[in-house]
Image (cartoon, helix red, strand yellow):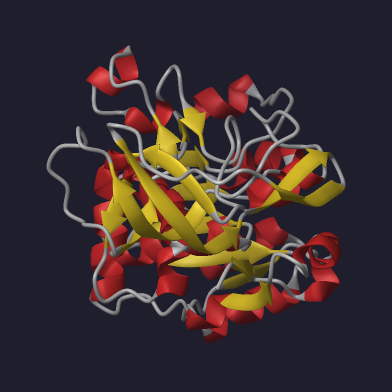
Amino acid sequence: MIAIVLEQPGTLSLQEQAAPTSAGPNEALVRVRRVGICGTDLHAFGGQQNFFSYPRIMGHELAVDVLDIGAAAGELDYAVGDTCCVIPYLNCGNCVACRRGKSNCCARMQVLGVHIDGGMRELFTLPADKLLKAEGVPVEQLALVEMLCIGAHAAKRARVSPGENALIIGAGPIGLATTQFAKIAGADVMVMEVNQARLEFCANTLGVNRLIDARGDALAQVKAQLGGELPTLVFDCTGSAKSMRGAFNYVAHGGSLVLVGHITGDLTFSDPHFHSHEMTLLASRNATPEDFSWVINSLRAGDIDLSPWITHYASPESILPDFPTWLDPAAGVIKAMLSFD
């Protein structure tokens, strides 16, 4: 079978590997249909991704066909022949986080395509309970469910109040997903971004009419939108240390900051500013099964139209030359997708 391997930062290769032929007792054997290209993959290619080791088969945003199910897999909501999305977080089930229902930040977390090999290959096996059937959701959209779940989880972490003013900093795919679910949760959203094409996407596709051009005086623009005040809820989705440090300055007194993106180094902030605002600081990592249900139900209900998000496609053969170009903002990538069909 064909596998796409990130051998080291900047080096992708197409390899022929032995294919699994059956599922283990608690596993499912799947054929990969689509792989969404995530910021995690792009950062790993650039050598700037947390929790990552090389060589690695990337790919954790997946739509797959079920080929075989292990005899001990138990009761499942899918069968051989079904097309499913993948929950790529392999949690232990026993640590303090898992016992409290926070499987998304398991102490022994292994994420497909990050800690262990993922889905940029034709066939692989995974725990059978990590597949979700979503009838009525097209295969391309199934591959983007996990991406949306990151935004859904961030919105849930923030406990959005209906009508609350929320600022999303960064309009990459995760920022767009956060924008989408902050809106669904009832927030009155504004988006800050340096890339004008992405701001236009927010306006034309997501219906966001409060846009902040981060190339100018962003703080003044935010205050102008809110009658001199600041938002009570800020999400930083950039993965930029400079942006994350600056995000504290956009939070109203008594407000909350949710760090959705993350960096490989340390993050510092002014304690007097933080304490004077009695600010709530939250990290948001991965997503829970409940987030996946929320996203799937939202897609089925037509609350989200993902078709404009997918701007670039690649085959296993074309992804080697195409992948490096997707790091260039001039390429205009909103979401790229690998197809094995």
Q: Nearer the viewer, residue 53 or 169?
A: 53
Image-based side of 172 in relation to 318, left or right: left
Counting from the top left corner in percent of width and height, residue 43 is at: 74, 45
Question: Residue drawn 24% across and 21% down?
Answer: 100
Residue extending farthest left: 75
Question: Residue drawn 31% across and 71% down?
Answer: 299
Counting from the top left corner in percent of width and height, residue 219 is at: 67, 56
Counting from the top left corner in percent of width and height, residue 78 is at: 21, 56
Q: Is residue 229 visible?
A: no
Q: Is residue 126 above or below residue 189?
A: above
Q: Is residue 112 above or below residue 302?
A: above
Question: Residue drawn 59% across and 30% down?
Answer: 115
Counting from the top left corner in percent of width and height, residue 65 is at: 38, 62
Q: Please count the marks in the image.
A: 0
* Quarter of the image where one finds residue 249: top right
Image-based side of 143 in relation to 66, left or right: right
Question: Residue drawn 45% across and 49% down?
Answer: 150
Q: Nearer the viewer, residue 165 or 146?
A: 146
Q: Nearer the viewer, residue 113 or 186?
A: 113
Q: Is residue 155 visible?
A: yes
Q: Is residue 336 above or below residue 293?
A: below
Image-based side of 186 in relation to 219, left or right: left
Which of the image's four quarters has the C terminus? bottom right
Q: Nearer the viewer, residue 238 or 107?
A: 107
